[in-house]
Image: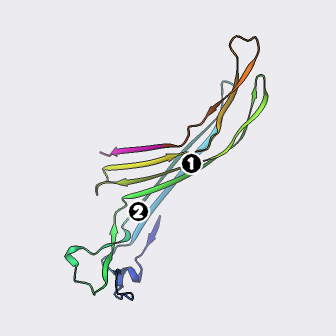
Amino acid sequence: MSFLLPSAENLYRILCPTGVNCTHGNTNLAPEQSLAVNLSLGGQITFVQRMLEWQLNGWDRTVDNLITTAPTPVAQLGAFPAGFTRTFINIPDKIGANVAVKFTGEKTANVTGFGPLAYANNYVVDAGVYVYLDQARAHRVTLRLENLLDETYATAVNSAVLAGTANQHFLWQRLAPPRTVQLNYSYYL
């Protein structure tokens, strides 16, 4: 949990040294309050003689009364000295973003016909942004980029016998998805 009081500038700025496009203070500002939670849980299990890795991540942050600037409201035009075109305001948390970096260490598989083979040993970066479309936070649009750096890496390796041969193996890899873009709309009841 964090707490940020408005600065003296946010509250009381009345000077405009440049004479143009200045931001006027607002004595009605409320303090910002935010709460961030980041949870992660993972492990390994053996299933049908194969090692499986799993991971569950969760992240959320809310900010109430975010302090920012906005154009001077029409009702207040002329109320500020010349040169002031903006004022400080509080806005509810309407936007958010996240970035996740996952490292998978080197894995080894004993592949028939090829012996022990190393694979994985890679980083994957995912990123997302969201925006609420209304004050009640009922409508949300999320844009998410998975595998942001478009890394090519194997999540599994194995072999199979080539059709029509007695014992000729070929190596195959299960590749992770390439860069993927998701655009989601959510409605919360």
Please give left or right for residue 40 compared with residue 10 in the image. Answer: right
Helix or strand or loop: what does disc 1 sit on?
strand
Helix or strand or loop: what does disc 2 sit on?
strand
Residue at the disc numbered 1: 40
Q: Are marks 2 and 1 in contact (CB under 8 Å)?
A: no
Q: Quadrant of residue 34?
A: bottom left
Residue at position x 32%, y 76% in the image: 86
At label 2, the amino acid type is: Val
Circle 2 crowding by C-alpha within 10 Å: few under 14, some 14–19, many from 20: many
- List x then y, in percent, for residue 114: 78, 26
How far is disc 2 from disc 1 in space, using C-alphas?
A: 22 Å
- List x then y, in percent, for residue 72: 27, 75
Between residues 180 and 27, which one lies in front from this camera angle? 180
Q: Quadrant of residue 15?
A: bottom left
For residue 1, above or below residue 118:
below
For residue 162, above or below residue 96:
above
Q: Which mark is residue 165?
A: none
Q: Residue furthest right?
A: 115
